[in-house]
Image (tube, rainbow, N blue to C red):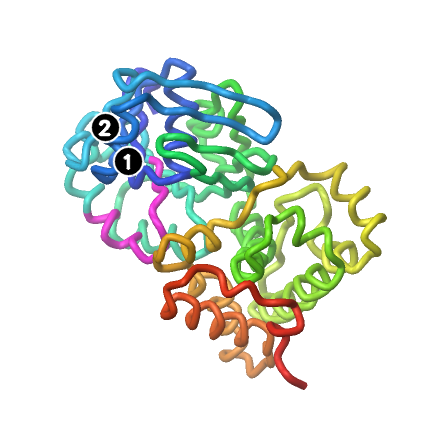
Amino acid sequence: MNSDRPIAVAGAGSIGCFVGGMCAAAGRRVALLARPRVIGEIEEGGLRLTGFDGFERRIAPNALTMSEDPSIFHDAGAVLVTVKSADTAEVADIIAKHAPTDAVIVSLQNGVGNVPALRDRLPGRKVLAAMVPFNVTAPQPARYHRATSGDIVIEADEAGTAARLSVPGLKMRPTGNIASVQWGKLLVNLNNALNALSGLPLRQQLGQRAWRSLFADQMAEGFVAIRAGGIRPVSPTPVPASWTPHLLRLPDAIFAAALGGTMKIDPEARSSMWEDLSRGRRTEIDYLQGVIVEIADRHGLPVPISRRVVALVRDAEADGKGSPRLTPEQIRPLP
């Protein structure tokens, strides 16, 4: 990847604007493929990036190339894919048509099926998987707030793409076992739906043992299902994946002390699925709990919590009123 060529962001939503903005703040050329609303907000007052740790950067509109026309990909050295999983096939066709054949494609998406979909539609191109451990919210127009900690992990390659994409304040680390890392992130992301159904800030939700116990039981379901498929997940946090359910079930004070040493969470952080429900958008439930249900069905395994969560999120999507603000007891399936 030639560092003089632009980094293109395919789908500049919360993650895309934050990552692209950080690259631009470091002096890299950045092209954002974005909706007119997002472009208009940034053109009006610039792009503002903030973080849970007090971090703040402002990027002038003229420091970015922004368009809803994918021809801005024409000279990209790298394309960061940040669209929702359901839009992966469509964005792959756009990349195929507009991006140079030697541009490296990096999926910064949730879930585990996006890279195979990209590779299927982009034969002969370099497509790398990645895992973004933190969440980004959009509390104000053109402001994108990093609400949790962690480094982006990218599939290792001979060109050292992870190091080439790293910029101050946004570290990217290579791994030789990205598939296991992505499955580990999927297990952690099962809380996205619980947080969306609760309506609570993440830190407040995770501070309550009843919510953590529900999360732990759901993770345990997921472990059984994916291990039946021969998958060995690697945790995206310093806590080993197999230990996480046990940690979640600890008393509140002990859990709070343990979490504080492994992950930083902004007091107002909520999951991206909560934001999707709040804005009346389609969620990624089919690519999270839905994947667990699909694997369980293939192996004849019971996953009642995952099935219940899928149904409740779909009900909330159809209702269109944001989070239903349920309790853990309302979410748990009846015995």
Residue at 61% x, 37% y is: 266
Q: Main secondary structure of the magenta part?
A: helix
Quick one: quadrant of the N terminus? top left
Question: Which element is circle 2 on?
Answer: strand
- Left/right placement of residue 7 relative to residue 157 reads left
Quick check: marks 1 and 2 in contact, CB under 8 Å? yes
For badge 1, the amino acid type reads Val
The first of marks 1 and 2 along the sequence is 1
Residue at 32% x, 30% y is: 78
In this orientation, which residue lies closer to the viewer: 160 or 217?
217
- Left/right placement of residue 335 relative to residue 99 reads right
- Residue stretch rendered in magenta on the structure: 80-93
Question: Which element is circle 1 on?
Answer: helix
Query: Which label number is shown at residue 38?
Result: 1
For badge 2, the amino acid type reads Met
Where, by quadrant of the figure, is residue 330 drawn? bottom right
Give x and y (percent) for residue 84.
Answer: 36, 51
Residue at 43% x, 38% y is: 138
| 89 is within the stretch colored magenta | yes
Residue at 42% x, 42% y is: 108
* Vertical arrangement, residue 201 with respect to residue 290, above or below: above
Residue that label 2 marks: 66
Give x and y (percent) for residue 11.
Answer: 30, 41
* Vertical arrangement, residue 298 with respect to residue 271, above or below: below
